[in-house]
Amino acid sequence: MATEQHQPGPEPVTENKNGGARRFSPDPVTLTAGIMTVAASIYFLVGGGWSTQRVLAFAAAAIGVIMLVASLRRS
């Protein structure tokens, strides 16, 4: 007995006012904030210091990576 498998269709392409396909671009505000967060966390990690500072730097790095991934995802 054969079973049917659902095949997803092609992703719909949205068009802009000029009739051309809209190109994907990352959100510049989120992208900039993510890059700045990662840069600040690397700065604090390289500088050393006490453990609370390192924990905050690791948290900032994680948040920065999440923000970068979110800005690069398609809406």
Image (spheres, rainbow, N blue to C red):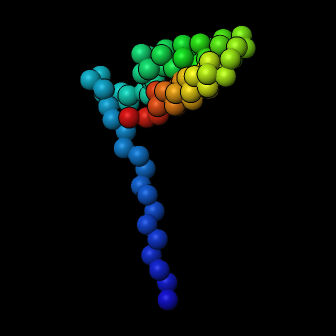
Q: Above or below — where is 6 with respect to 49?
A: below
Q: Quadrant of residue 24?
A: top left
Task: Name the residue at 57% across, 22% down.
Answer: 56
Task: Name the residue at 71% across, 10% down.
Answer: 47
Give how far across and how far down residue 26 sits, in percent. Answer: 46, 23
Give how far across and how far down residue 61 sits, in percent. Answer: 59, 24
Q: Quadrant of residue 53?
A: top right
Task: Name the residue at 49% across, 14% down.
Answer: 32
Residue closest to the eye, 35 or 26: 35
Residue closest to the eye, 9 or 39: 39
Q: How many marks?
A: 0
Tell me, yes or no, if residue 61 can be seen here: no
Task: Name the residue at 52% across, 27% down.
Answer: 63
Give how far across and how far down residue 35 sits, in percent. Answer: 55, 16
Tell me, yes or no, if residue 38 can be seen here: yes
- The residue lying furthest to the left in this view is 17
* Horizontal arrangement in the rendering, residue 25 relative to residue 54 (left or right): left
